[in-house]
Image: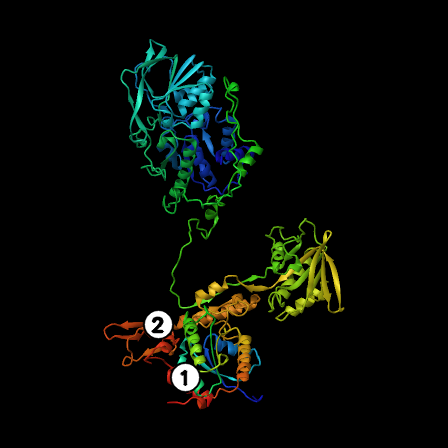
C-alpha cells in the first residue's frame, strides 16, 4: 500500500475520561495522528455495538472505543458494561473477516493526554499497515 | 499500680506550691469543726477569696485526724504542716469553742457570717447495750483515743478486749498494745470478710500479736466494780441485711468468757447533735440531714458534710465533702444554682484495651516497707514507711500507660471559652449539604525512596519538615538548630528537588520548595551563622516579593550551587555531599555537618480512596483532577464538588488561600440559588415500544428505572437518571433513548464523519 493511505478511524469517547483526555492532549499541545474522528458519548456504556458496525459499513478503516479506567467510571459502573459487550463484538467482527487490529477498546483517563496520543498513533499505524477496509464495496447488502 | 503509695511519695517529697492569695471577696464564712471536712471546706473557700473562720470544740485542730487516727498511722508532724499551710492562707481557727454551747448558729449569722458549714464529725460512740457497761475499766473507743491523743492519762490493763470491727476498733487495739497491754483481743460479731476496717490494718494488727475472735458478741461485762471479764456468745451468719452484709445470729448455748481487765467498745459512732439542739434536722441514724451531693441542709446558708452526715467514714470522704460544700457555698453566696453544670460523680470510662507484647516481663508490685514488729511496741512511730525514691521509680515504671490522659479534667476547667469537652466521643453524622469542598491537602515525599541520600540511616540527614520542626520555638530543641549530638552545625547543605523533577520519583515541580529552602537557609544564617550551601537545579522564585527574597538570601552569604546533589556519604564525623557544579562544569564534594533534603509535595496516600468516595478523578501524579486546567481549576467533573488547596496539586500558601476562597465562592453560588438545574441529557423509554424485558432495570447504577407492573413497561425517573446511556445501548427494542445522544443522532454523526 502506498504511503499516502490515511486511514479513517471512528473513535467513540466517553465524555468524562477519554474525551477530556483528548482535550488534555490538545491543551498540552501534544502532536498526534489526525486520523481519529471523535464522536462523544456520555459513557462508553452508551456505545451500542450497532454503532461500530455502522461505522465500518459507512467506510471506516478502524473503530476505537475509549472509556474511563475500570473503577473510575463517572457513572460508577458504565464501563464494566462496555468491558462485557466489546470483546463479544470483537469476536463477531473477526468472524466477519475484519482484522482484530481494526477494532480496539482502550481506557484513557482525563489526565492521560499523552496516553491518548500514543493510542491514536499506534492504532493509526496498525490500520495503515492493514490497508483500507472498504467494507461497503465488499459486502453485498440484502 | 500502687497509686496511694506513689501519691504519698510525691506528697512526702514535694513541698506544696507557694500560696498566691486571691482577691479578697470580703464575705465571711464560718466553718464548724477543724477536722478533714471542715479544713477542706475552709481551704477551698479561702482559695476562692472568702474570709473563713473555723470554730473547733477541741484544744487542737485536726478533728479525728488529730484525736482519732493514731500517730503511727498519721504522724502529727505531717498533719501540723498541712494545717499550718491552711492557716497561712488566712484561715482563722478558733479552738475550744463548742458551737451550740459557747456560740449558737444564730449568733454566728449575727456576727456577719453569710454561710456556715457544719463538719462536726462523729465523735460520740454507740453504747454496747449490755449489763456492766458502767463498770470501771469499760472505755469508749473514740474517747479512749481522744484522751490519749490529747495527752490525758489513759490506762489500760494487762488483758484488753476491744469490741467492734471498724478502724476505730483496730486503732484502739493497736494503741492499747503500744500502751503496754500484754494481751489484746478484738471481738467482732461477723467474719473477717465483713470487717469494715482496711484489710492491711487487720493484717498489721495480727502481725503485732493482736488476737481476733470472729463471730462473737458480748452479752455481759463481768465484774463487781472493776471489769474482770467479758461474757460472749458465738454467732453465725444469716441472710444479708440492709447493708448487704450477712446478719449475725446468736447460736444458743455457745457462750464463753474472755478474761479482761479493760473493755473498749468501738461498735460505731454518730455526731453529737445534742448541743446544736433544734438548729439542725437529724436523720433516723442520728446524723445531720443534708444533701449528700451539694451538702445543703434544710436551713438556707447552712451546709453540712463529712462524718456528721455520712456516719463514720474515711478522711478522704470527708475531704471530698468539704470541697463540694465549698463550691456549694460559693454558688449560694453568688446567687447561683447549686447543681447547674456540676458533675458530682467522677465519670467512669473503660480504658482502651491494650495488647501487651509476649516477651513483656512480669514485674511484681513494690511492697511498702513497714516498721519491724519488734520495734512497734511501746512507741507510736509510723508503721508504713513509704517508698524510697528508687522503689517509687520502679513502681511508676510498671505503668502500662494504657490511658495517657489521667482524666483530671483540669484542661476543661482551665479553658475559658469551654472549647474542651472531655466527654466528647467520635460519632457518625449525616449531613444534608448542597456542595462539598475537598481540602484534604498533601504529604511530603519520603526520602527513603532515594537511597543515595541515606536518609534515615545516619543522623544529621534530615528532611525539610524535620528541619522546620527543629526551628520551631515549641519544638524538641526549643527552636535551636542542633546536630544529633547537641553541637551547633558549622556548615549546612540543602539539597533541592528531592522527590521532584526526577524520573526516579516524580517528574513535576513542587513549586514552593525553593522558597521554603531559602527561608530555612535564612534561619540557619540568623540562628547559627553557619556556612549554608543550596544545591539546586533551577531556582523557581516566581511570585510577589520572591525574587527579592532570593537576592536577600544571597546577600546574607548563602552559597548557591547549580547542580543536583548526587549523593550524601558519611565520612568520620561529618557528611560529604557529592554534586556537580554546572557553573564550574565539574563534580564537587562538600563536607558539611547537616544535610537537609528539601522534599517535594506528593498526593496523600489515601487520595484514591477519597476520589472513589466522591466520584472525582485523579491526575497522573495522584492529585485530584480539576474539570479544566485553565477555566475550571477548582471544579471537578462531579457537580457540586469543588477542590481547595494542595489536594489539587502543589501550591504555596497565597495560592492555596486564593484557590480555597474561589472554591468557597463557587459553592456559595450553588447554595445561594437554592436549587440546581440538572443536565437535559437523560434517558427516556418510549412506552409504546417497550416490551417490558427489564434488561435496563438491572443495568442502571442509580436505580433510576422502575418497572411498572401494571402497564408491564419500564420507566425512567428523570430526577435520578444521570444520562450515561448504558440502558439505551442495551435495549433490544430501541424503546430506550438518550436525549441528545439518541441512535438517530449518533448514526448521523457516524455518517457525517465518514462522508
> What is the number of callouts on the image?
2
- Where is residue B614 drawn, in percent x and y? 44, 66
Q: Which residue is mark 1?
A: B746
Q: Position of residue A84 (x, y in %)?
A: 41, 72
Decide: is B663 above or below A49: above
Q: Earlier in the sequence, mark 1 or mark 2?
A: 2
Can residue A59 be seen in this snapshot?
Answer: yes
**Which residue is at the far left?**
B710
Marks 1 and 2: CB-CB under 8 Å? no
Q: Is residue B719 above or below residue B443?
A: below
- Of residue B342 and residue B489, the one placed in the foreground of this image is B489
Give me the disc on residue B720.
Answer: 2
Q: Say which residue appears at 49% left-offset and 29% top-offset.
A: B79
Q: Position of residue B456 (x, y in %)?
A: 63, 54
Residue A26 seen in the figure = no
10 Å crowding of disc 1: few (<14), some (14-19), many (20+)? some
Marks 1, 2: nearer the viewer? 1
Q: CA distance from mark 1 to mark 2?
A: 24 Å
Q: A131 and B154: which one is in front?
A: A131
Residue B675, percent across and down?
37, 73
Q: Look at the numbered disc 1 and give the secondary structure of its residue.
A: helix
Q: Residue at x 44, y 35 (%)?
A: B40
The crowding category of the residue bearing disc 2, from other C-alpha atoms within 10 Å (few below 14, some 14 to 19, many at least 20), is: few
Q: Are marks 1 and 2 on the same chain?
A: yes
The tag on residue B451 is none
* Nearest the eye: B415 or B198: B198
Say which element carries label 2: loop
Farthest residue toward the top? B224
> On the rendered structure, is B107 left or right of B149?
left
Residue at x-position 45% and y-position 66%? B612
Q: Nearer the viewer, residue B261 or B150?
A: B261
Query: On what subunit does the disc labeled 2 rest?
Result: B
Amino acid at each position: 500500500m502506498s504511503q499516502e493511505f490515511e486511514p479513517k478511524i471512528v473513535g467513540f469517547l466517553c465524555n468524562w475520561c477519554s474525551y477530556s483526555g483528548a482535550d488534555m492532549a490538545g491543551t498540552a499541545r501534544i502532536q498526534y495522528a489526525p486520523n481519529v474522528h471523535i464522536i462523544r458519548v456520555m459513557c462508553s456504556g452508551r456505545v451500542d455495538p450497532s454503532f461500530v458496525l455502522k461505522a465500518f459499513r459507512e467506510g471506516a478503516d478502524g473503530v476505537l472505543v475509549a472509556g474511563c479506567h475500570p473503577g473510575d467510571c463517572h457513572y460508577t459502573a458504565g464501563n464494566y458494561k462496555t468491558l462485557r459487550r466489546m470483546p463479544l463484538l470483537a469476536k463477531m467482527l473477526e468472524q466477519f473477516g475484519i482484522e482484530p487490529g481494526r477494532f480496539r477498546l482502550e481506557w484513557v483517563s482525563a489526565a492521560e493526554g499523552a496516553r491518548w496520543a500514543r493510542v491514536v498513533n499506534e492504532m493509526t499505524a496498525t490500520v495503515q499497515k492493514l490497508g483500507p477496509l472498504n467494507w461497503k464495496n465488499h459486502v453485498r447488502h440484502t | 499500680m500502687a497509686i496511694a503509695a506513689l501519691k504519698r511519695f510525691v506528697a512526702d517529697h514535694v513541698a506544696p506550691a507557694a500560696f498566691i492569695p486571691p482577691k479578697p471577696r470580703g464575705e465571711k464564712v464560718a466553718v464548724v469543726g477543724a477536722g478533714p471536712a471542715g479544713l477542706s471546706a475552709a481551704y477551698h473557700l479561702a482559695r476562692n477569696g472568702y474570709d473563713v473562720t473555723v470554730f473547733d470544740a477541741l484544744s487542737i485542730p485536726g478533728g479525728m485526724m488529730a484525736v482519732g487516727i493514731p500517730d503511727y498511722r498519721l504522724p502529727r508532724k505531717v498533719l501540723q504542716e498541712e494545717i499550718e499551710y491552711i492557716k497561712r492562707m488566712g484561715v482563722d481557727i478558733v479552738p475550744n469553742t463548742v458551737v451550740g454551747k459557747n456560740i449558737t448558729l444564730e449568733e454566728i449569722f449575727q456576727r456577719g457570717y453569710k454561710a456556715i458549714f457544719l463538719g462536726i464529725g462523729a465523735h460520740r460512740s454507740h453504747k454496747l447495750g449490755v449489763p456492766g457497761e458502767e463498770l470501771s475499766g469499760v472505755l469508749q473507743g473514740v474517747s479512749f483515743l481522744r484522751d490519749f491523743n490529747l495527752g490525758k492519762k489513759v490506762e489500760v490493763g494487762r488483758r484488753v478486749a476491744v469490741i467492734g470491727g471498724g478502724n476505730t476498733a483496730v486503732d484502739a487495739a493497736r494503741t492499747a498494745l503500744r500502751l503496754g497491754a500484754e494481751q489484746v483481743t478484738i471481738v467482732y460479731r461477723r467474719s473477717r470478710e465483713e470487717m469494715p476496717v482496711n484489710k492491711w490494718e487487720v493484717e498489721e494488727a495480727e502481725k503485732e500479736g493482736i488476737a481476733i475472735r470472729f463471730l462473737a458478741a458480748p452479752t455481759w461485762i463481768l465484774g463487781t466494780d472493776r471489769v474482770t471479764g467479758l461474757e460472749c456468745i458465738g454467732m453465725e451468719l444469716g441472710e444479708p441485711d440492709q447493708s448487704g452484709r450477712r446478719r449475725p445470729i446468736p447460736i444458743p448455748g455457745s457462750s464463753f468468757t474472755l478474761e479482761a481487765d479493760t473493755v473498749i467498745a468501738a461498735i460505731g459512732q454518730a455526731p453529737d447533735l445534742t448541743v446544736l439542739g433544734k438548729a439542725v434536722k437529724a436523720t433516723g441514724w442520728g446524723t445531720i440531714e443534708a444533701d449528700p451531693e451539694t451538702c445543703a441542709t434544710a436551713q438556707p446558708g447552712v451546709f453540712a458534710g463529712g462524718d456528721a452526715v455520712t456516719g463514720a467514714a474515711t478522711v478522704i470522704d470527708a475531704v471530698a465533702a468539704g470541697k463540694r460544700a465549698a463550691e456549694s457555698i460559693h454558688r449560694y453566696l453568688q446567687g447561683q444554682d447549686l447543681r447547674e453544670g456540676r458533675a458530682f460523680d467522677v465519670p467512669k470510662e473503660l480504658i482502651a484495651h491494650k495488647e501487651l507484647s509476649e516477651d513483656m516481663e512480669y514485674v511484681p508490685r513494690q511492697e511498702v516497707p513497714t516498721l519491724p514488729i519488734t520495734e512497734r511496741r511501746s512507741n507510736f512511730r509510723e508503721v508504713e514507711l513509704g517508698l524510697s525514691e528508687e522503689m517509687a521509680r520502679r513502681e511508676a515504671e510498671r505503668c502500662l500507660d494504657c490511658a495517657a490522659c489521667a482524666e483530671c479534667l483540669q484542661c476543661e476547667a482551665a479553658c475559658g471559652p469551654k472549647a474542651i469537652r472531655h466527654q466528647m466521643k467520635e460519632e457518625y453524622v449525616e449531613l444534608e449539604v448542597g456542595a462539598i469542598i475537598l481540602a484534604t491537602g498533601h504529604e511530603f515525599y519520603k526520602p527513603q525512596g532515594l537511597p543515595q541520600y541515606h536518609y534515615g540511616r545516619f543522623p544529621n540527614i534530615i528532611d525539610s519538615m524535620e528541619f522546620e520542626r527543629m526551628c520551631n520555638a515549641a519544638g524538641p530543641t526549643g527552636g535551636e538548630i542542633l546536630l544529633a549530638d547537641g553541637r551547633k552545625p558549622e556548615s549546612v547543605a540543602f539539597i533541592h528537588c528531592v522527590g521532584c523533577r526526577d524520573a526516579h520519583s516524580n517528574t513535576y515541580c513542587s513549586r514552593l520548595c525553593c522558597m521554603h529552602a531559602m527561608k530555612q537557609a535564612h534561619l540557619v544564617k540568623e540562628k547559627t551563622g553557619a556556612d549554608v550551601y543550596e544545591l539546586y537545579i533551577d531556582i523557581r522564585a516566581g511570585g510577589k516579593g520572591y525574587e527579592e527574597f532570593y537576592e536577600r538570601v544571597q546577600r546574607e552569604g548563602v552559597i548557591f550551587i547549580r547542580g543536583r546533589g548526587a549523593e550524601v556519604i558519611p565520612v568520620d564525623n561529618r557528611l560529604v555531599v557529592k554534586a556537580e557544579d554546572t557553573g564550574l562544569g565539574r563534580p564537587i564534594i562538600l563536607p558539611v555537618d547537616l544535610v537537609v533534603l528539601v522534599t517535594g509535595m506528593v498526593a496523600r496516600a489515601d487520595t484514591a480512596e477519597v476520589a472513589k468516595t466522591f466520584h472525582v478523578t485523579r491526575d497522573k501524579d495522584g492529585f485530584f483532577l480539576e474539570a479544566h486546567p485553565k477555566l475550571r481549576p477548582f471544579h471537578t467533573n462531579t457537580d457540586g464538588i469543588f477542590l481547595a488547596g494542595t489536594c489539587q496539586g502543589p501550591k504555596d500558601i497565597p495560592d492555596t488561600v486564593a484557590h480555597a476562597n474561589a472554591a468557597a465562592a463557587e459553592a456559595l453560588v450553588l447554595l445561594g440559588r437554592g436549587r440546581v438545574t440538572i443536565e437535559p441529557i437523560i434517558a427516556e423509554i418510549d412506552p409504546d415500544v417497550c416490551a417490558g424485558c427489564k434488561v435496563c432495570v438491572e443495568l442502571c447504577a442509580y436505580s433510576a428505572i422502575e418497572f411498572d407492573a401494571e402497564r408491564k413497561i419500564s420507566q425512567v425517573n428523570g430526577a435520578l437518571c444521570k444520562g450515561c446511556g448504558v440502558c439505551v445501548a442495551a435495549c433490544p427494542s430501541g424503546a430506550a433513548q438518550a436525549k441528545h445522544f439518541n441512535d438517530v443522532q449518533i448514526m448521523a454523526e457516524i455518517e457525517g464523519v465518514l462522508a
